[in-house]
Image (cartoon, grey):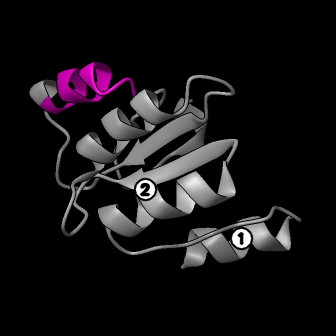
Amino acid sequence: MTLAALLREDGHDVRAVYNGRFALRAAAEFEPEAVFLDINLPEINGWEVARQLRRAHVSPRPTIIALSGVYKKAADKILAELARIDYYPAKPYDPRRC
């Protein structure tokens, strides 16, 4: 909610959803330029959402940024690469590191 509010304040058109199934539906309807994903989503996790988004959107391809405070190990970063996630910063996020 906070990230969505900040992006709206900055003038962006934002859709916020709370589970993987709704994320896929919103992306199909909205066709976003960027997608912020939490990996630990109910119903369909963020890695699977990213994989399905990549299969569904050939062009233009949305930038996918996945955030996680739980999945921060090296193996989790490999899963992010396999899901073709563009950026995978860990929480708490430090913008000086990107």
User: Does the magenta portion include 16?
Assistant: no
* Amino acid identity at mark 2: Leu
Residue 53 coordinates in the image, percent (x, y)? 44, 39
Instruction: Please tell me which of labels 2 and 1 falls first in the chain.
Output: 1
Q: 52 or 37, which lies in front?
A: 52
Q: Look at the numbered disc 1 and give the secondary structure of its residue.
A: helix
Q: Quadrant of residue 61?
A: top right
Quote the CA–CA distance across marks 2 and 1.
Answer: 22 Å
The disc label shown at residue 19, or none: none
Residue 10 coordinates in the image, percent (x, y)? 85, 64
The disc label shown at residue 24, or none: 2
Other-residue count near label 1 (Cα within 10 Å), few / some / many at <14 / 14–19 / ≥20: few
Q: Quadrant of the N terminus?
A: bottom right
Q: Which span is picked out in magenta?
A: 76-85
Task: Assign the magenta stretch its main secondary structure.
Answer: helix
Q: How many marks?
A: 2
Residue tagged by mark 1? 6
* Amino acid identity at mark 1: Leu
Residue 86 coordinates in the image, percent (x, y)? 48, 26
